[in-house]
Amino acid sequence: SAMAARIAVGSEAGPPPGVELCIVYPKASSGGSALLDVEQQVRLVHEAAAQELEGPAVCDATSSPAHRSTSIWQVRPPPGKHGHRIPGSQYFALLVWMSLLLAQFALVRVVCLGLIIPEDCRANPSPVQIMADFQYLLSMGFVLAILTGMHWPDRLSYVFSFRWPNKRGPAFLVLYFFTGPAYGALNQIPVLGSFSLTTIQGPNIALFIAVLGGAAALFIWHVWIAFRHNSLSGFLAYALSRVALAVFFAGYLIVKAQHQDVKLHFHHYAVGFIIASFAEFNHPLSLVVLACGTAVFVQGIAAYGADEIVHYGQVTLSFSAGGRMYTSPFVSDAAADFFIQHCRVA
């Protein structure tokens, strides 16, 4: 085991005055002293803090975020058999994040019903559809919080800073709540309203190239920041987690390639989610990406529903009988072919 001592430090090279740091002293061996050079420990802690890397400052998971350890090899086991190690501040951070998602959802629904923006939004979704949307919104929103660090109190306090001169909080909220309705309003423009990532043709080709180029630039920038300002383990954690996400969404393309009767539509809520998932860093550009990407993710679900990315084709059958026209519910392509070939209206 190890003994941990807390000291208050304050210097130009380190944290602000009064901030506590954890210094860990290994258990003494039979042949020497257990205490390390305190000045050397403090210097190493200051260097690690300046580089935003994990250094010798190791505290348990209930410590304040500035002292948290991100290594599974250094965090000590919880005290006692039933020790609780998740601080309430993390639950509060998640509550704030989920509340933001629901607030954007409500705003988009109000704009849809009141202003008919976008004009093809779902007017009256059923309770079953709404609950299905919430299920996807909150579950994927939770994943997005983990990927972008919004479950950490220190990350939350950085994003929602309301102190002068770094008033990032108001800027983030204005951009976030503006982007959702504004993205829906783009649908009123004919060229943009017909744009789709899965049906690229005619004048949409140039727009597709622009969107793809912008997304690639943001991706490369975030990867560079992750490489430039992290340790090798930190960079690999960032890169591999995003690769895993890309592999998951690539699975939709594989399913489509293997099944010709499957329809593929890459909804913009998925695009917004992917873009927002890169925005992990405490940097103005990364916060802009987080605000806009998350807003597009929520807007897509609120306006159109969390429709499947891949699904079997569905059609309706129309026929006349007794001088009246009848239209069937949606059925699969195979079912429609069967009815057309083997059934007739009496």
Image (cartoon, grey):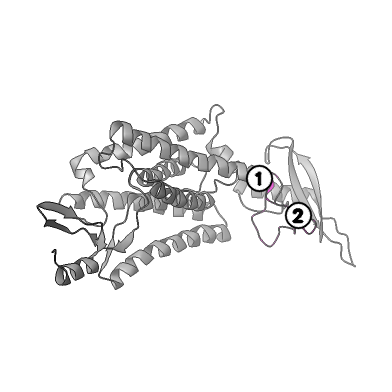
Q: Is residue 226 above or below residue 92?
A: below
- The amino acid type found where label 2 is placed reads Gly
* Residue drawn at x 23%, y 44% as measured from the top left: 192
Please provide the residue range marked out in magenta: 64-86
Which residue is depicted at the point 41% across and 50% down? 128
Quarter of the C terminus within the rendering: bottom left
The quarter in which the N terminus is drawn is: bottom right
Question: How far is the residue under mark 1 from the one under mark 2?
Answer: 19 Å
Between disc 1 and disc 2, the foreground one is 2
The reply to whether residue 217 is in sight is: no
Mark 2: secondary structure: loop
Mark 2 residue crowding within 10 angstroms, few (<14) / some (14–19) / many (20+): few
Main SS type for the magenta part? loop
Q: Is residue 153 magenta-colored?
A: no
Front position in the image: 311 or 181: 311
Look at label 1 and name its amino acid.
Answer: Pro
Q: Is residue 170 above or below residue 69?
A: above
Residue 231 in picture, x, y percent from top left: 57, 57
Residue 339 lies left or right of residue 128; in this view the side is left
**Secondary structure type for disc 1:** helix
Residue tagged by mark 1?
65
Residue 279 horizontal side relative to residue 306, left or right: right
Q: Residue 55 location, x and y as percent?
A: 68, 53
Quarter assignment of residue 317: bottom left
Taking 251 as reference, is 268 above or below it? above
Q: Is residue 70 magenta?
A: yes
Residue visible at 25% across and 52% down? Answer: 196
Q: Position of residue 241 (x, y in %)?
A: 49, 60
Q: Earlier in the sequence, mark 1 or mark 2?
A: 1
Residue under label 2 = 83
